[in-house]
Image (spheres, rainbow, N blue to C red):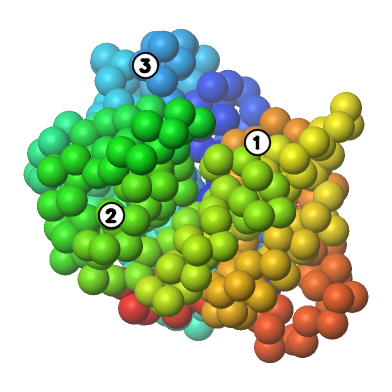
């Protein structure tokens, strides 16, 4: 059993609707593959890509019938409608979860749970009512930034000056508002200073949904050991990303995401922050590399590797779903 913190399947389907739907597709994640692999559920991200890329989505996607303009907010609204409509069509297999109690109810009813997140909150546009609108759509987790600064603050950057720039005034107030409203703050993609601002302001646990160890792989998107300790001390979790570039400094020509390397990052971060701070944040359908875990039905390879390294069943249970369930219970 497992619960995954991040995938970009909705965006991939919006690029090319011929790939299928959320129930069955040629991508890494769909409801049927999830059921086959024993998934308890996952977060489905609404990835708000660049304006230039959004403009290409008007044709050949579920936006043909719903999108009038290619704005970030239009994209979020259309994606949320698609997400909920797919759940309704497959209500005998999976159901929406807006809080931890919903997950428990779904489990009792033999259903998987689907939760909704946003990757890049720029559509908030300095307005708290827009954040409330996200919550009304079902969003319960949000990356404040992606790979560009926005109304919340600065994204992670190789430029030391930018990476030392933190949250905006709106971003700092938004952290408090999201705590009150019930949207978990996701620090993946934030600059180092923005990360520390969240840690200082947030009264509730926060997470890094798809980030790895900067000590093992010195990519700026990964977290330092000190950041790992901070997330752990605040009761949050870190979802380990399956992307080869975040697992290996030099992934080589094969650009392969290895299960052994995923386990390396998990074990290192457990040694730094404790067993309570690690989860799965695969980033499937959002990464471009060869994968040993080719889709969700191969997730057992990771569980087998953790067992091979001496992880107990109780520790594997914490990594695969219990840790994130604790955070959902604390925050929602």
| Residue at the image position 32 percent from the left and 30 percent from the top | 149
- Residue 212 location, x and y as percent? 62, 53
Q: Quadrant of the N terminus?
A: bottom right
Instruction: Say if residue 109 shows up in the picture.
Output: no
Q: Residues within 10 Å of mark 2 (few under 14, many from 20)?
A: some
Estimate how packed mark 3 is, as few (under 14), some (14 to 19) or many (20 or more) residues with alpha carbons within 10 Å. few
Measured along the vertical axis of the image, is residue 149 above or below residue 135?
above
Residue 135's x, y, as percent? 23, 53
Determine contact: label 1, label 3, CB under 8 Å.
Answer: no
* Relative horizontal placement of residue 58, taking residue 202 as reference (left or right): right
Separation of disc 2 and disc 1 at Cα?
28 Å
Q: For the point 84% across and 82% down, which residue is it? A: 310
Task: Determine which residue is flagged by label 2.
Answer: 197
Find the distance from the CA under tag 1 to the CA under tag 3: 20 Å
Look at the image and tell me in which quarter the C terminus lies.
bottom left
Check the image and report above or below for 119 versus 211.
above
Give residue 285's position: percent from left, percent from top: 63, 38
Q: Earlier in the sequence, mark 2 or mark 1?
A: 2
Q: Decide: few, some or many residues near mark 1? Use Cα within 10 Å; few <14, some 14-19, many ≥20.
A: some
Q: Residue beneath label 3, please?
A: 51
Mark 1 residue element: loop
223 or 18: nearer the viewer: 223
Q: Which residue is mark 1?
A: 287
Tell me which numbered mark, 3 or 2, is placed earlier along the sequence. Answer: 3
Taking the spot 61% from the left edge, 72% from the top edge, the residue there is 272
Q: For residue 212, which numbered disc appears in the image?
A: none
Residue extending farthest to the front is 161
Tell me if I can see residue 250 in this picture: yes
Q: Position of residue 104 (x, y in %)?
A: 45, 80
Give left or right: position of 97 versus 170.
right
């Amino acid at each position: 059993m497992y619960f995954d913190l991040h995938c970009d399947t909705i965006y991939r389907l919006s690029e090319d609707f011929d790939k299928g739907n959320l129930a069955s597709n040629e991508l890494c994640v769909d409801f049927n593959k999830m059921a086959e692999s024993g998934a308890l559920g996952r977060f489905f991200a609404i990835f708000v890509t660049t304006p230039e890329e959004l403009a290409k989505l008007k044709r050949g996607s579920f936006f043909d019938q719903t999108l009038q303009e290619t704005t970030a907010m239009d994209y979020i609204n259309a994606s949320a409608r698609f997400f909920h409509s797919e759940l309704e069509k497959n209500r005998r297999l999976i159901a929406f979860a807006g809080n931890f109690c919903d997950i428990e109810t779904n489990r009792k009813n033999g259903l998987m749970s689907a939760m909704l997140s946003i990757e890049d909150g720029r559509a908030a546009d300095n307005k708290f009512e827009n954040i409330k609108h996200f919550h009304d759509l079902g969003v319960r987790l949000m990356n404040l930034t992606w790979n560009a600064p926005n109304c919340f603050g600065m994204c992670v950057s190789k430029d030391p000056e930018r990476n030392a720039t933190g949250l905006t005034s709106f971003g700092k107030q938004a952290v408090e508002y999201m705590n009150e409203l019930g949207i978990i703050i996701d620090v993946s993609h934030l600059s180092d200073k923005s990360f520390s601002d969240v840690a200082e302001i947030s009264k509730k646990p926060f997470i890094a949904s798809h980030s790895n160890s900067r000590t093992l792989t010195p990519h700026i998107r990964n977290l330092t050991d000190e950041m790992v300790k901070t997330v752990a001390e605040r009761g949050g979790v870190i979802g380990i990303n399956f992307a080869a570039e975040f697992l290996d400094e030099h992934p080589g020509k094969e650009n392969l995401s290895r299960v052994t390397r995923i386990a390396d990052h998990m074990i290192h971060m457990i040694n730094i922050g404790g067993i309570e701070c690690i989860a799965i944040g695969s980033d499937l359908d959002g990464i471009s590399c060869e994968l040993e875990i080719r889709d969700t039905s191969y997730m057992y390879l990771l569980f087998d590797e953790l067992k091979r390294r001496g992880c107990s069943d109780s520790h594997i249970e914490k990594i695969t779903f219990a840790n994130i369930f604790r955070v959902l219970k604390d925050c929602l």
